[in-house]
Image (tube, rainbow, N blue to C red):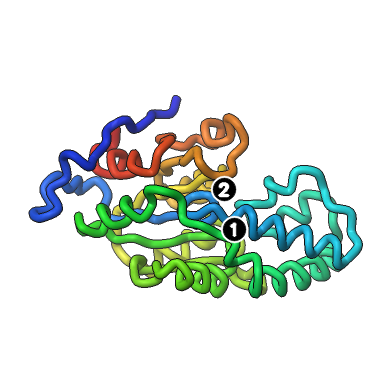
């Protein structure tokens, strides 16, 4: 059974004194795609470009490609390693120049980040997107300085799974009491591999019931509910 945060913290946070800070967590690690920003238009456009350019037949429902490393998603659809290399080359070229910027921060996210920072929470990013690409997008948003650590996958796939990325981020952070926030089962399962609980968010790209089945500790429907979970563990 998952729990749902319902409290709006805006009325009872004291930003001047930090009153209400809950020591159960001191660090919030965010996924990027589908959690902080709606990146689907750019990802789907770059996937469409890659399939058109290479001539490979695209699978149905490309939305499910958003979240896991794309190489993993391609493998799950039965593409060979050679085909994946060709597709990824085309995709990356288009995404780097075009797709990355067809992207918008979800309403309410900036206020959540501001509130958490004002209450002395450490903030970090753990994304399956290549780290260089993630940094490029966060710089585009003007968000780079908001995060103590920005961790992503490597182009050579030596750090590819969400668990591997999280391990890297946790190592960079040092001692912490972290909670993960993400929109897909990969976020929940990756967090669990490191003994972390996960807040699942419903505005991203999860299929119905996906977060519940993965074991998200909390599921929230509005960004401001993240603060209530972090503070009160409701």
Question: Which mark, residue 197?
Answer: none
The foreground one among 122 and 145 is 145
Residue at the (40%, 35%) spot, across then down = 218
The foreground one among 202 and 189 is 202
The foreground one among 34 and 159 is 34
The x, y position of residue 136, in whole percent, is 52, 73
The x, y position of residue 79, in whole percent, is 84, 57
Asked which secondary structure carries label 2, the reply is: helix
Disc 2 and disc 1 in contact, CB within 8 angstroms? yes
Asked which secondary structure carries label 1, the reply is: loop
Quarter in which the N terminus is drawn = top left
Residue at the (49%, 72%) spot, across then down = 135
The x, y position of residue 167, in whole percent, is 47, 61
Answer above or below: position of 66 versus 54: above
The residue to which callout 2 is attached is 186
Quarter in which the C terminus is drawn = top left
Residue at the (60%, 66%) spot, across then down = 100
The residue to which callout 1 is attached is 161
């Amino acid at each position: 059974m998952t729990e749902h945060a319902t409290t709006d913290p805006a009325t009872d946070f004291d930003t001047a004194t930090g009153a209400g800070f809950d020591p159960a967590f001191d660090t919030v690690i965010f996924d990027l795609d589908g959690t902080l920003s709606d990146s689907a238009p750019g990802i789907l456009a770059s996937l469409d470009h890659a399939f058109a350019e290479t001539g490979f037949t695209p699978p149905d429902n490309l939305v499910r490609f958003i979240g896991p490393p794309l190489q993993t998603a391609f493998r799950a659809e039965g593409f060979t390693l050679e085909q994946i290399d060709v597709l990824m080359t085309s995709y990356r070229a288009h995404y780097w120049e075009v797709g990355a910027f067809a992207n918008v921060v979800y309403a309410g996210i900036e206020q959540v980040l501001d509130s958490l920072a004002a209450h002395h929470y450490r903030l970090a990013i753990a994304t399956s997107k290549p780290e260089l690409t993630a940094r490029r997008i966060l710089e585009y948003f003007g968000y780079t300085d908001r995060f103590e650590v920005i961790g992503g996958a490597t182009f050579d796939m030596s750090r590819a799974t969400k668990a591997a990325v999280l391990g890297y981020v946790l190592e960079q952070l040092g001692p912490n009491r972290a909670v993960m926030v993400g929109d897909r089962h990969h976020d929940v399962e990756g967090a669990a591999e490191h003994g972390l609980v996960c807040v699942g968010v419903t505005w991203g790209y999860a299929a119905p019931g996906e977060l519940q089945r993965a074991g998200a500790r909390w599921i929230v429907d509005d960004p401001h509910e993240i603060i209530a979970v972090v503070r009160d563990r409701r």
